[in-house]
Image: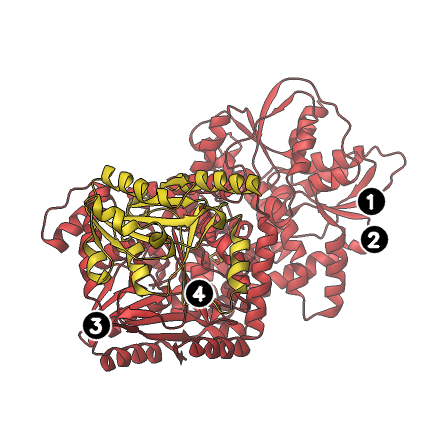
Amino acid sequence: MVERLNDLYEKFKAKFEGVNGECYRVAKIEEIGNLAVKILANKGAKTIALYESPLSQAAKLKEKLCSAGFEVHTDNLFAASSQDDVGITEVNWGIAELGSMVQIAPEVDNRLCSTLVPIHLALLRTKSIVADVDEIMEILDNLPQIPGFVGFITGPSRSSDIERILEIGVHGPEQVILILVDE
Amino acid sequence: MANTQLKKEISEALQNNVLRGALERFSRLYVIAREKAYEGYDFEDLRNNIQRVKSYAADHIDEMIDLFEKNAKARGAKVFRAANGKEANDYVRRIAKENNVKKVVKSKSMASEEILMNEALREDGLEVQETDLGEFIIAIEGKHPSHMVFPAIHLTKEQVADLFTGYTKKKNDPVISKLVKTARSVMRKKFLEADMGISGANIAVAETGTLFTFTNEGNARLTSTIPRVHVYIVGIEKIVPKFKDATYIMKALPRNGTAQNITTYVSLYTGATEAYLEDGTKGEKEFHIVILDNGRRKILQDEKFRQIFNCIRCGGCINVCPAFQLVGGHVYGGHAYTGGIGTILTAFLTSEETANQVQNLCLQCGSCTEVCAGKLNIPEMILELRNRHGAKTGLPFTQKFALDVVSNRRLFHSLLRIASVAQKPFTKGQPVIRHLPMFLSGLTEGRSLPAIAKTPFRDIFPTIKQDVPNPKGTVAFYAGCLVDFVYPRIGEGVVSALNEVGYKVVFPEKQSCCGAPASYMGDKENAVKSAILNIEALEAEKVDYIVSACPTCTHGLLDYQKLLEDKPEMLKRAKVLAEKLYDFPKLITMLGGLKDKGDGIPLKVTYHDSCHLRRTMGVYKEQRALLAGTSGIELIEMKESDRCCGFAGSYSIKFPEISVPILQRKIQNILETGAEVVALDCPGCLMQITGGLDQINSKIKVKHTAELLLDKRKK
Ligand code: SF4
């Protein structure tokens, strides 16, 4: 069980980094806050649009970020996400085979905080990493109904539209960071 | 578009070095990257499944649309069925008016380009913004996309910088990362202000009413998240029955399109979701789905073309098309669809006239059929377009005349004999000429063509001593025009090898041109004539096998079954012929192969796969084994060995400007191997490549496998 988890994690991490993502793993929920502070401070970020989720609340993320000096917005997220440096959301699954994150996000704020911002910081439970696309489609298919919005996100936004040269950060985030938590 | 216009656009495209460079670079990288992306995947299995689910949906289209509509509505979507572009555009205009829309953002939707939706919306004074980077660039340029996946691939960063400078009224440097930033900030404002978003779908799931959109830039996500009114334009061919059916397309589309394992974003929308409304509060958005027919049902009614519904618009076919790689998409004339599949879509959805012109660009090399995610046979459909067009309008007089001559065996053969005498002054004592005499003139622009042989194979054959004491059986040799009249030595090689495996060879005298030239030029009448002539001449019923040393002819002979569908007696005979017919290397291998021997003199040989042999017949190992098994021969593989050499029958006559650069790439790949001999199995390729090497005065020889085996084994 643990072995399988580690194996999936290793695969996921390699793929995630292969598409220019940054991947971190912590054991305890309480560690999320400090790690987030460290990462975001390093990037020189100041303002944050936080879409609250079970994980962010359990981690007391807002408190920790605020006390570390960040300006954190949790409402009026349309305005916030269009100006802030960072958006934080929780995602539902990871796909090891592709390094993709999968979010169920029918709520507009959830989507804005993962799309409009230059830096998207995502939270995910390590045990929610699945092996491949088939597995995730099976899971979705077995839900009582397909959610209003499901997004697969694989790295930061990109384009090769000019001279076929790959450029990161077009309309979506330029950086995608994921903190995985084992607890 | 008149033919002269097409020619003009081809020449412009060929002079656009940016376009050519970008397309060529991409085409080389693509093949390797695609292969890597499919590692661990069974592509055949994947595309069989795509074909299965898509054709199921096509066969049950009404039920599928009803189901989709019902399920999408149940989730709060408003669904409108548009029979044509005008209905779709009118509907969207009405929605815009009713919802007090001023500004529209669009993420990529080929269906909306097909029906010129932007133009329609602008008539109402709406501000419409394309948000896909490439689409945005060409919108400023005022052009249509030059590529299905990379719409602005024809432009350099310098040109893009100039366009952006003009658009933003601020100086833009030609630095790609900065240009992308400009696009981001220009577009960001548009997104935030937009009241309506318009999207295109890659998949629509009947069972759940879910729409899938694949993008890399994130513009589609913003288009569908910010505006309070969201409209999806969905062609009826996008439907799959079950939610999980989408998985197959998810796996194939990005791998085939951009050689990515998955696009950055795959977004699934099911019904209306939440948005910020006009008054700043959050609530359910206006969510509309326009299901577009616009000629698509007509495709379904056409047996020969309904496979188009299996297409997932991945662009894989375009990525490997040698003609497209040279000229890009603008030449294809349609304002939405380009390349081979684009030609067919254009024929049904936008302009039949345009399609009739650009279908000529197809080389019939079949590269696209190897990568197609929906298992479409594009070359076959293009040929069908050609035939229908040919039947309707007739061919130009000179072409028709040439084909009439070719299908008249006596006349054709005697002209060839006369030609062999008449050409003397042109051959400069070499086995190539730069001008063919008489009715074949026009063939030689930009290349050297072979001289007609002094003695045709049909006259040599009776003099060959076949030493087969206890023959295991009899093989009829179908030589085809080129072996018979230009390369008789290939015929000698064929006979010798067959004798060695214990078979006697007969040469049916009355055989004539296989009819492929007529087929390829869309002249069905003459093709049928040739078919009957050869079936009667070959009398397949009386021999064990029929051997051909020209895969184009083999293909042509196999196709008799299609040509004679409505002539049951002949069809029966065509089937017997098809069952006994094999290409030279295949037959020799089947009959036990040749015993390893050879003169032992070292010779570096590289091998070129002809399109028909490699792709239509799937023969590529056999000849390599025969060659490698001959002592002395060192086989060196060239890059892109199965890439078309640009000959393609009449193609090199009609479009020398495209055929020649394709040939040059082949020549370059040959030179890089350091080989002394290029072996191949198609006399057409032999003619083309010999001509190409002759133009650069290369010493490399080009030989048919049968001829090379003969040289190395029977000196
Ligand atoms: S024809 Fe085949 S390869 Fe071309 S776009 Fe359609 S599915 Fe893709």
Of marks 2 and 4, the one in the foreground: 4
Please tell me in which quadrant of the rendered image residue B624 appears: top right
Residue under label 4:
B345
Which badge, 2 or 1, comes first in the chain's sequence?
Answer: 1
Q: Secondary structure at mark 1?
A: strand
Mark 1 vs 3: CB contact within 8 A:
no
Question: Crowding at label 4, few (<14), some or many (≥20) Cα neighbours within 10 Å?
Answer: many
Residue B122's tag is 3
Disc 2 residue type (three-letter): Lys
Label 3: chain letter: B
Q: Chain A's colour?
A: yellow
At a point 43% along the width and 39% down the height, the residue shown is B29
Q: List the residue tagged with mark 1.
A: B474
Q: Residue at x 60, y 44 (%)?
A: B614
- Mark 2–mark 3 Cα distance, whole angstroms, equals 71 Å
Whether pointer 1 and pointer 4 mark residues with C-beta atoms closer than 8 Å, the reply is no
Query: Which residue is denoted by mark 2 in the rendering?
Result: B542
Subunit under mark 4: B
